[in-house]
Image (cartoon, grey):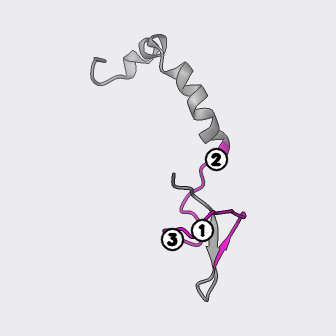
Amino acid sequence: MPTTLEATIDEKGNVLLQSPIQLATSRRALVIVLEEEPAFHISETALLSEAVLAEDWNRPEEDEAWLHLQHEPLS
C-alpha cells in the first residue's frame, strides 16, 4: 500500500524526510516538488470536522430547510 511522507529537498537535491520510516527492502518512490508556500491554507479543524458535519447536513430535514434556495428541484 502506498505511503505518503512529507519531506524537503535541499539545494543539492538531497531528500530529507520529516519523520523516520523503516522499510524491509529498498522501494521506489515518487517525488513531487511543491511550491515553496502553499497557495492557500486549509484548516485541519475544518478537514477533521467535515465528516461529522456531513452527517448532520446530509439529512432530508436539511434539504427541506434550504429548498427555497435551490434553482433545480431535488431528485
Q: Could you tell me which secondary element the residue under label 3 belongs to?
A: loop
Q: CA–CA distance between discs 3 and 1?
A: 17 Å
Closest to the observer: 36 or 30?
30
Task: Where is residue 16? Give x, y as percent.
Answer: 67, 74
Q: CA–CA distance between discs 2 and 1?
A: 15 Å
Q: Is residue 28 shown in magenta?
A: yes
Question: Label 1 amino acid?
Answer: Glu
Magenta range is 15-44
* For residue 41, above or below residue 27: above
Q: Could you tell me which secondary element the residue under label 1 belongs to?
A: loop
Q: Check disc 1 and report the residue beneath it.
A: 37
Question: Label 3 amino acid?
Answer: Val
Is 35 on the left-hand or right-hand side of 19? Answer: left
The image quarter containing residue 75 is top left
Kindly identify which numbered label has been placed on residue 43: 2
* For residue 49, above or below residue 34: above
Viewer-side label of 3, 1: 3
Task: Where is residue 74? Give x, y as percent.
Answer: 31, 18
User: Contact, CB < 8 Å: mark 3 with mark 1?
Assistant: no
Kindly identify which numbered label has been placed on residue 31: 3
Residue drawn where x is 68% and y is 62% of the image: 22
